[in-house]
């Protein structure tokens, strides 16, 4: 197996890239690859609009992740609005998950 598609490599790449880029609205960041198509999929989910500063921070992180790959790889960067109370939809590997208090019934 190519080491650039291994779980440890992907998680370390994403977590390193997120250092200094985590915006308070970011709820979750996840990653997976499609080795056959040479595509890195990144999904960022926000508590609020997936625009402006939160998106810019995560786009910077996405560029850092892509830099860890051979130049032939492409990036699928997804930015989704997922307000608290709504389910998150992670890709294969979750690199960041914001702590959120659970409301008791």
Image: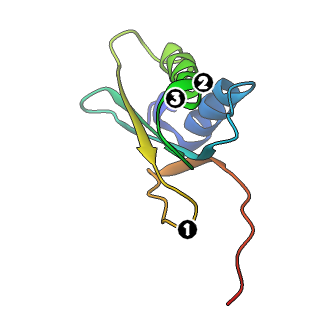
Where does residue 18 sit, x and y in percent of width and height?
66, 29
Question: Along the line of sight, which residue is nearer the eye, 47 or 42?
Answer: 47
Horizontally, residue 3 falls left or right of residue 70, namely right
Question: Along the line of sight, which residue is nearer the eye, 60 or 24?
Answer: 24
Q: Quadrant of residue 74?
A: top left
Q: Residues within 10 Å of mark 2 (few under 14, many from 20)?
A: some
**Which residue: 52% across, 39% down?**
6
User: Residue beneath label 3, please?
Assistant: 55
User: Residue beneath label 1, please?
Assistant: 85
Marks 2 & 3, CB-CB < 8 Å contact: yes
Question: Along the line of sight, which residue is nearer the eye, 92 or 5?
Answer: 92
Q: Residues within 10 Å of mark 3 (few under 14, many from 20)?
A: many
Question: CA separation, marks 2 and 3?
Answer: 5 Å
Where does residue 93 sit, x and y in percent of width and height?
52, 49
Where does residue 35 sit, x and y in percent of width and height?
33, 33
Question: CA separation, marks 2 and 1?
Answer: 23 Å
**Which residue: 75% across, 24% down?**
20
**Which residue: 52% across, 30% down?**
3
Horizontally, residue 16 falls left or right of residue 61, namely right
Closer to the chain start, of discs 3 and 1, is 3
Q: Above or below — where is 27 with respect to 64? A: below
Element under label 2? helix
Where does residue 100 sit, x and y in percent of width and height?
72, 62
The coloring applied to the image is: rainbow
Q: Above or below — where is 5 with respect to 96? A: above
**Which residue: 71% across, 85% down?**
104
Horizontally, residue 88 falls left or right of residue 74, namely right
Indicate which disc residue 57 carries. Answer: 2
Question: Along the line of sight, which residue is nearer the eye, 93 or 77?
Answer: 77
Element under label 3? helix
């Amino acid at each position: 197996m190519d080491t650039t598609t291994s779980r440890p490599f992907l998680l370390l790449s994403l977590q390193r890239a997120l250092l200094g880029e985590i915006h308070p609205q970011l709820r979750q960041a996840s990653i997976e690859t499609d080795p056959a198509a040479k595509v890195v999929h990144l999904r960022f989910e926000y508590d609020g609009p997936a625009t402006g500063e939160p998106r810019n921070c995560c786009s910077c992180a996405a560029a850092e992740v892509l830099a860890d790959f051979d130049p032939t790889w492409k990036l699928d960067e997804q930015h989704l609005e997922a307000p608290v109370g709504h389910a998150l939809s992670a890709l294969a590997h979750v690199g960041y998950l914001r702590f959120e208090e659970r409301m008791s019934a």
